[in-house]
Amino acid sequence: MKLATFNINNINRRLPNLLDWLRVRRPDVVCLQELKATDRQFPRTAIAEAGYGAAFVGQSAWNGVAILARGAEPVVTETTLPGDPDDQQARYIEAAVNGVVIACLYAPNGNPQPGPKYDYKLRWMERLHAHAAGLRASKLPIVLAGDYNIVPEARDIYVTTSYRDNALVQPAARAAYRALLEQGWTDALRKLYPDEPALYTFWDYMRNRWERNAGLRLDHFLLSKNLVRKLKGGAVDREVRGREGASDHAPVWIELDL
């Protein structure tokens, strides 16, 4: 099974790029974030014609998440992250695909910090930690995939001071990500490339950051223990970021021998 995560940054605007990438890479499961489309605006016909079933939670202007499955329909188990019934932001969807539970998440950015947006980010991560504990206890094969909006370590960002006050690199945010690893989840990309410093998945549009390879690693796969030994490969499709009209994120994928 080839699984991918891709912050598409407006699915309708990037649809030609997405469809071309699906045709070339043919991933079995794709987690999409930042759809920036309501459910009615989701391009379900084009996705279906590309050979994919889709489950999605849309939202106008911002947010929105989706799970695509090649030749199958995802069996949805959650459409919100449990723990706050008042949270209206479309940031989480969970579904079973071919015996694997896939969680697609788009964690809050948290800027500016300090402030209410950063507080929301940390509360959201606490909810994710609690829900992940329940998922892990189920003993099912589980993947937590998506844009975590956290740079886990100093080596996961280019050398700079411009992000010093950014929510993505703050100690509390990094501690929230580390708490998931300590719970028993495995960072798939780091498992595959333990010594690679520049596993960047995001390059801001500003200040020629793509051209300078001034990137950050924000998009992650966390695997349940029973999937780690099945991890066979993975990479960042960097070239997709360099195309005309590209998202500011590149797709990331892994392969599991199931």
Image (spheres, rainbow, N blue to C red):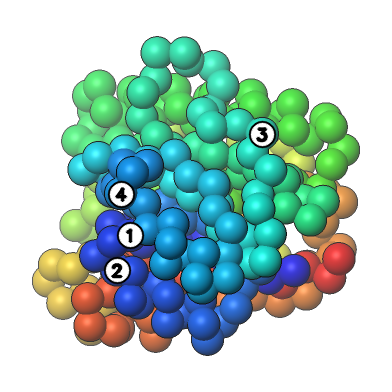
- Residue type at mark 2? Arg
Q: Name the residue under label 4.
A: 41
Tag 1's secondary structure?
A: loop
- Amino acid type for the residue under numbered disc 1: Ile
User: Is residue 195 among the parts visible in the rendering?
Assistant: no
Are the residues tagged 2 and 1 within 8 Å (C-beta)? Answer: yes
Label 4: which secondary element: loop
User: Are discs 2 and 3 less than 8 Å apart at CB?
Assistant: no
Q: Nearer the viewer, residue 250 or 72?
A: 72
Q: Are marks 4 and 1 in contact (CB under 8 Å)?
A: no
Q: Position of residue 81 (x, y in %)?
A: 53, 28
Lower position in the chain sequence, tag 4 or tag 1 = 1
Residue kind at label 3, given as amino acid type: Thr
Mark 4 neighbour density, 10 Å: few (under 14) some (14–19) many (20 or more): some
Look at mark 1 in the image and give the residue it sits on.
11
Of circles 4 and 2, the one toward us is 4
